[in-house]
Image (spheres, grey):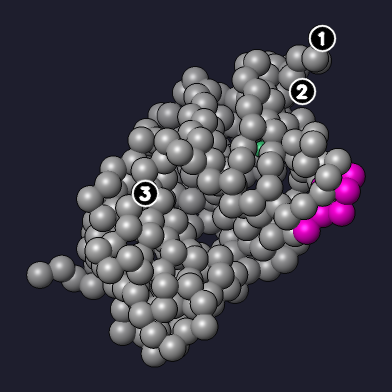
Amino acid sequence: MKKQRQLKQVIDSVQTLEGGGFPIRRPFPTRTMNYFDPFLLFDHMGPVDWPPNQAIGAPDHPHRGFETVTYMLEGHMQHKDSHGNKGDLNPGDVQWMTAGAGIVHSELPREDFLKSGGVMNGIQLWVNLPAEKKMTRPRYQDIPSDKLPTATSADGKVWVRVIAGESMGVNAVIDTHIPIIYLHFKIQPGGQVTQSIPDGLNAFLYILTGQLTIADSENAVTEAQMAVLSEGDAVRVSVPAQASEEASFVLLAGPPLNEPVARYGPFVMNTQREIYQAIEDFRAGRMGEIAPEL
Ligand code: MN
């Protein structure tokens, strides 16, 4: 018999600007919650409907000591980095980037998207690395949506895209440094799913649209809320039959690293000294730069 996780806490997102000034909704980090071990940041970018030539991204900037995971829902981004990698992010695509010892990259609206304008919507998650892996070699996993496994329940009411971990008998193709579960669910009114989440992992849901009920909770959680789960080894999520729309949400889980977190902007290390070193290395060009297009 599985021990059900319950809804432990609901956290409302704050609205702010990130990168070159694009709007995001952010459950953490905030003044009240610096991180949710092993996750350092969760940004819901948009949805924002950009007029032509207005879309904003994040120009050249460095990272060290963790992983950035970008999941596009709508719109088109383009990334470039100091290792010569370049690629598009289209709806449903995931870029799992291990910054490790350091990279410089840019995350910008694709040129034709910038010109035409349109809806941009996505998620950026930062996953911490344990101390012994913070200076690991940078690694890219760029996975287009048609290579990301999905599953649908027998009654057709539950759909899941498996970004990391396992769900409904389907395993992820993305390799992670620590055991992460990252699932995108869509549940129709009257649908429900029980997802196993091994005991000992910290877990939460973030609701993109609609509303849903977690375990035996009386109150539904809704758009832009983070739902922190209690301990246990599974969670039951359902959408009331009388709901007016499907619920779309992501489920994240990972093992707490229980290590000190020293963070300064795009660098997340264990000590202040390592932060100074990161700033120095970046300034000295030791994280590289993005080569100009010829
Ligand atoms: Mn970045």
Question: Is residue 50 located in the magenta-colored stretch of the structure?
Answer: yes
Q: CA distance from mark 3 to mark 2?
A: 42 Å
Which residue is outermost to the left?
1
Return the residue at label 3: 150
Vertical relation: 233 (above or below) 138: below
Q: Position of residue 145 (x, y in %)?
A: 49, 41
Which of these two is toward me, 254 or 237?
237
Task: Mark 1: give few (<14), some (14-19) or many (20+) Cα within 10 Å.
Answer: few
Which quadrant does the C terminus fall into? top right
Query: Which tag, 1 or 2, sits closer to the chain's start?
Result: 2
Vertical relation: 27 (above or below) 219: above
Q: Which mark is residue 294?
A: 1
286 left or right of 36 in image: right
Q: Name the magenta segment's main secondary structure.
A: loop
60 left or right of 223 in image: right
Magenta region: which residues? 49-55
Which quadrant does the N terminus fall into? bottom left
Which of these two is toward me, 244 or 139?
244
Q: Are marks 3 and 2 in contact (CB under 8 Å)?
A: no
Task: Mark 2: give few (<14), some (14-19) or many (20+) Cα within 10 Å.
Answer: few
Q: Please tell me whether mark 1 or mark 2 is closer to you in this view.
A: 1
Q: Please tell me whether mark 3 or mark 1 is closer to you in this view.
A: 3
Which residue is outermost to the right?
53
At a point 89% along the width and 45% down the height, the residue shown is: 53
